[in-house]
Image (cartoon, rainbow, N blue to C red):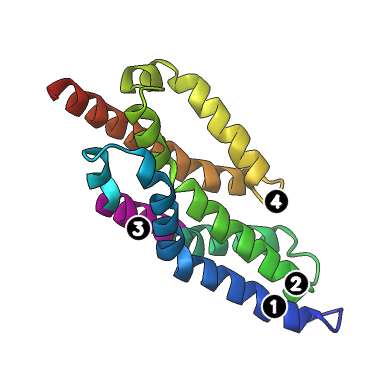
Amino acid sequence: MYLNPTEPFNLYLMIALVLGLFAASPFVLYQFWLFIAPGLYRTEKRYVLPFLISTVGLFLAGGLFGYKMVYPASLDFLIGYGERFQPMITIGEYTKLFATIIIGLGLMFEMPILVFFLALMRVISAGWMWRNLRYSVLVIFIVAAIVTPTADILNMCLFAAPMLALYAISIGVAWLVGARREQC
């Protein structure tokens, strides 16, 4: 159902934008790498292929997780919550919710890459991340509450759960970077 004559057209634009973002992510991230590569030493440039594979893989995994897990659960909860009423969902609202969840989770899944570079630059360490775990959990739930397109706790937890798992993975990434740095 749509209420505005431009909504079907905007639907196709939004879907094209989301698909284009995911399809273009390898090229955009490669261009990002080419931008920062001149400022790196030769030994640091060997990270280009792992960077591209992990960044694109995590972004696609986040989008897939949002598409398969979070989006259906969000719709089930939100529509089920108002089961006493007749839902009349417009395509504009449907695609806005879809794009917010898919792109938001795609970006959230980049946390280990961010931690890798912060640990590489010695801004953070695995020990620091472990010592500040309780504050990190609080910040993760605050970010999940902000990013969640709805105000319910279920969607907030659906966003926070992968972020908590990614934080645990990020502690491992920071530990590996620190251990590798000590070997050199």
Of labels 4 and 1, earlier in sequence is: 1
**Secondary structure under the numbered disc 3 in the rendered image:** helix
**How far from the left and from the top, in percent, is residue 93?**
74, 67
| Residue 89 in which image quadrant | bottom right
Can you tell which of label 2 and label 4 is closer to the viewer? Answer: 2
Residue type highlighted by circle 2: Gly
Residue drawn at x 42%, y 64% as measured from the top left = 27
Disc 1 and disc 2 in contact, CB within 8 angstroms: yes
Q: SS class of the residue under badge 2?
A: helix
Q: From the viewer's perspective, is 6 left or right of 31?
A: right
Measuring from the top left, give residue 169's x and y in whole percent.
Answer: 33, 37
Query: Main SS of the magenta segment?
Result: helix
* Position of the N terminus by quadrant: bottom right
Kindly identify which residue carries mark 4.
150
**Is 59 inside the magenta-drawn segment?**
yes
Rounded to the nearest whole Å, what is the CA distance between mark 2 and mark 4? 15 Å
Q: Tell me where the magenta segment starts and ends, as one range.
A: 49-62
Disc 3 marks a residue whose amino acid type is: Gly
Q: Are marks 2 and 3 in contact (CB under 8 Å)?
A: no
Q: Which residue is at the front of the view, 98 or 53?
A: 53
Three-letter amino acid code at disc 4?
A: Thr
Q: Give the spatial CA distance, label 1 vs label 3.
A: 26 Å
Q: Extreme right residue here?
A: 4
Q: Which residue is mark 3?
A: 57
Identify the mark at residue 92; answer none if there is no mark: 2
